[in-house]
Image (tube, rainbow, N blue to C red):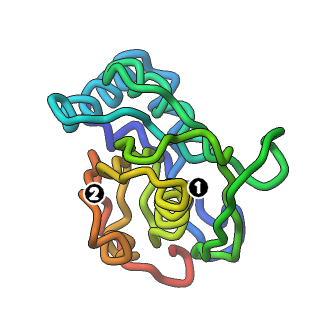
Amino acid sequence: MGLEEHIRNIPGFPIPGIQFKDITPLLRDPESLRQSVDQLASQWAGRSVDYVVGIESRGFILGAPLAYLLSAGFVPVRKPGKLPADIVSAEYSLEYGVNRLEMHRDAIEPGKRVLIVDDLLATGGSARAAAQLVESVGGIVAGMSFLIELGSLHGREKLACYDVRSLITFEEVPSNEQA
């Protein structure tokens, strides 16, 4: 069974018109979880990565073990109001609204190489915001890694100046039941 067979579609979540890709079946299967993290790590083996930035919240699940395997530190990028120290923030648009991400200002030293990780690349907004955070404190985005990419939403185009990699690509065409 391939990894994509462990991804469940939830129509109309979080709002009507969105086809949510639920990774919880993959996460609860030990072999699929191990395979996912190992494959993500193998894409970056031998590359210089000082930190893995995980985007809240599913980026934490994949990012922390990936940082461990790459012998890198882990930096959480959070939704607003969750970090206790001085922060930098970036706003972004997503397929169903606007949001903001935050990171501790002192999380990444200038010149350090950073891998940005999340479960899903859709429109590219949150990944681009995370890159803005990294770059605003002097970090260098070494690349971006995603478990799933929704090719029909063209998020990769918004991230064209970065090395973007994904394990699973779905090419669904958005309709009134999908986005």
Identify the element where label 2 is drawn. Answer: strand
| Residue annotated with mark 1 | 10
Residue 64 badge: none
Identify the element where label 1 is drawn. Answer: strand
In the displayed structure, 65 sits above or below 132; it is: above
* Callout 2 crowding tier (Cα within 10 Å): few <14, some 14–19, many ≥20: some
In the displayed structure, 41 sits above or below 93; it is: above
Residue at the outermost front position: 110
| Residue sitting at x 27%, y 70% | 161
Q: Locate residue 121 relative to residue 125 in the image: left or right.
A: left
In this rendered view, identify the residue nearer to me: 176 or 46: 46
Cα separation, mark 2 vs mark 1, equals: 26 Å
Q: Position of residue 54 (x, y in %)?
A: 52, 41
| Residue sitting at x 26%, y 31% | 1
- Badge 1 amino acid: Ile
Quadrant housing residue 174: bottom left
Q: Position of residue 32 (x, y in %)?
A: 36, 25
Q: Locate residue 56 relative to residue 41 in the image: left or right.
A: right
Q: Locate residue 95 relative to residue 173 in the image: left or right.
A: right
Quadrant housing residue 136: bottom right
**Closer to the observer: label 2 or label 1?**
2
- Badge 2 amino acid: Val
Quadrant housing residue 169: bottom left
| Residue annotated with mark 2 | 164
Contact, mark 2 vs mark 1 (Cβ under 8 Å): no
In the displayed structure, 129 sits above or below 72; it is: below
The earlier-in-sequence mark between 2 and 1 is 1
Q: Position of residue 140 (x, y in %)?
A: 36, 52
Q: Position of residue 137 (x, y in %)?
A: 54, 54
| Residue sitting at x 45%, y 68% | 124
In this rendered view, identify the residue nearer to me: 161 or 167: 161
